[in-house]
Image (spheres, coloured by chain):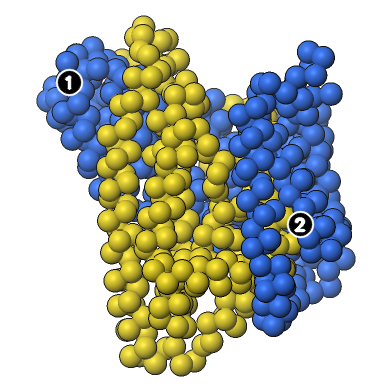
Amino acid sequence: MTLTIQHLYYLVGIILAITAVLTVRDATNPRRYSSGLFWAIYAVVFLVGDKLDPVIVGVMAVAMAVIAGFKGVAGGKHQPRTDAQYLESAKRLGNKLFVPALAIPLITMIGTLSGKYLVVGGTPLLDPKNTTLVSLGVGCVIALGLACSMTRETPAQGIRESWRLTDALGWALVLPQMLGMLGLVFSEAGVGKAVAHVTTEYINMDVKFIAVAVYVIGMALFTIIMGNGFAAFPVMTGGVGVPVLVHHFGGDPAVMAAVGMLSGYCGTLMTPMAANFNLVPAALLEIDKNAVIRAQIPTALLLLTCNVFLLYFLMFHK
Amino acid sequence: MLTDVNLWPLIGVAIIIVGFVLRFNPMLVVVVTAIGTAFAAGFPVEKVLAAIGTGFVKTRNLPLIILLPLAVIGLLERHGLRQHAQRWISSIQSATAGRLLIVYLAARQLTAAIGLTSLGGHPQMVRPLLAPMAEGATENRFGRLPAKVREKLRAFSAATDNVGLFFGEDIFVAFGAIVLMTTFLKEAGIEVEPIHVALWGIPTAICAFLIHAVRLYRLDAALAADIEKARQSGELGRESAGAAQNNTAQQGA
């Protein structure tokens, strides 16, 4: 049997369904019914989302946004352990605590690298299209086993801890997926074409340096809007990169592409649209939601400036 | 030049910028933007909802990387992982937050460059290990930390993971972005070798390391100044660092 990403969707769906039940039963949660409904809908999306009519999933996504938008998602009061208890087990377990934590990336890495050799009777063990994510899933399950045997806890306690952290993250957990959805709607609606049209129509591209700057800064700006350098790349490269930098000025396309994509990544560092990298870590670390972006903006702007000059001088290296 | 490009979907860009600037709830902003953009493109109601639904199902892989490690990390935190990470770094006398993060930046960038992008990440590495270590190293030198300094350390830990990953992975030739770039150029009639695209990512990667490492190098001095200022204003007297941290760890986001 091949372990596929679909199995991970079922696993996450079950975890979210338990989260929904625990939330509804949590008397310390001031919004336990609306929060429970939010997680229940999300569980359904993972369990049977691909079998439902897209219109129904669309209604469910809108419903989730409405619940979150009107402050319907809250967390309960989870009783923390005392400082002494934390220190006691930290002392008792010591460096062993690092083992399950580091096992996750290690197993993910091993799975990713060896995925194509793990074949039994012609059937791959890990979904070849999603080796990394499936390996991550395997790594997390093995690490949970390690953590349970080490701390003498049950997997059920692990699920309760997962619920505690899910409660703390709240709707921020769903935001990356919402933004990913928006990116797909944008491209279906032709937003990229419209932006490329406006950029090329109204800016004077006859000066080489201006053209380079427009491409580099445009990649960053468009990534800030779309939240993803992959979405910005075809638009800016099709609109400015290929016709102006390569065909008109004769630049090296490999340099243009490499520096262009990395300029897009500078945009990723500066935008809330890249929720997975900027907003979710802020929620995970319990700090202001823009704190990570604020820490990254100086690096991003300095690097973007470097990129303008790197592209300008390296593009004509021949 | 007359074209048949429909400019109305650009209204989506305007909605999302206004929504974020006015700090409306991001989930609502995103959904309203999706609906507005799809309407502007001339989709009927049913197609609008279907576009949202299809997109939402297609992107189910995005939250996996956050959701899957939560049970393990939560369980280890319950047994003092953060406290142990702090104690462990305290035993290294020369460790400062800046130096620790520079080492992590280099390691993250180099491992990503050889394709090991999963050796890091916010739920598995930054929350349970890197951020507590940065805090522990700083506490070791200065004692109790004001909340502002704690926030700065955590933000810089997350930022360092991002910078290292982004400007490392593009050098790896089998990475998705390289495939995307060469495929796109091929469709535009330009043949480039993936290895060339990967190699020309190196100058930017070096610049990224230098810029961010210099900022991290200066972070230690900035933290010292912040802590000194907080001491003078008497802010530190009122809060106990350990208790403050455990409280925030339990609060909702």
Horizontally, residue B20 falls left or right of residue A34, namely: left
Q: Is residue B159 visible?
A: yes
**Residue A5 in which image quadrant:** top right
Instruction: Say which element carries label 1.
Output: loop
Instruction: Say if B191 sits above or below A144 in the image.
Output: above
The N terminus of chain A - image quarter: top right
Residue B8 in view, yes or no: no
Q: Quadrant of residue B250?
A: bottom right
Residue neighbourhood size for the residue with mark 1, other residues' Cα within 10 Å, grouped as few (<14), some (14–19), many (≥20): few
Chain designation of label 2:
A
For chain B, the rendered hue is yellow
Which of labels 1 and 2 is toward the front?
2
**Chain A drawn colour:** blue
Q: Quadrant of residue A201?
A: top left
Q: Residue at position x 71%, y 42% from top?
A: A139
Q: Mark 1 belongs to which amino acid? A: His
Q: Earlier in the sequence, mark 1 or mark 2?
A: 2
Looking at the image, which residue is at 22% across and 42% down? Answer: A305
The residue wearing badge 2 is A147
Name the residue carrying label 1.
A317
Task: Estimate the spatial distance between the alpha carbons at disc 1 and disc 2, rounded to whole Å.
Answer: 54 Å
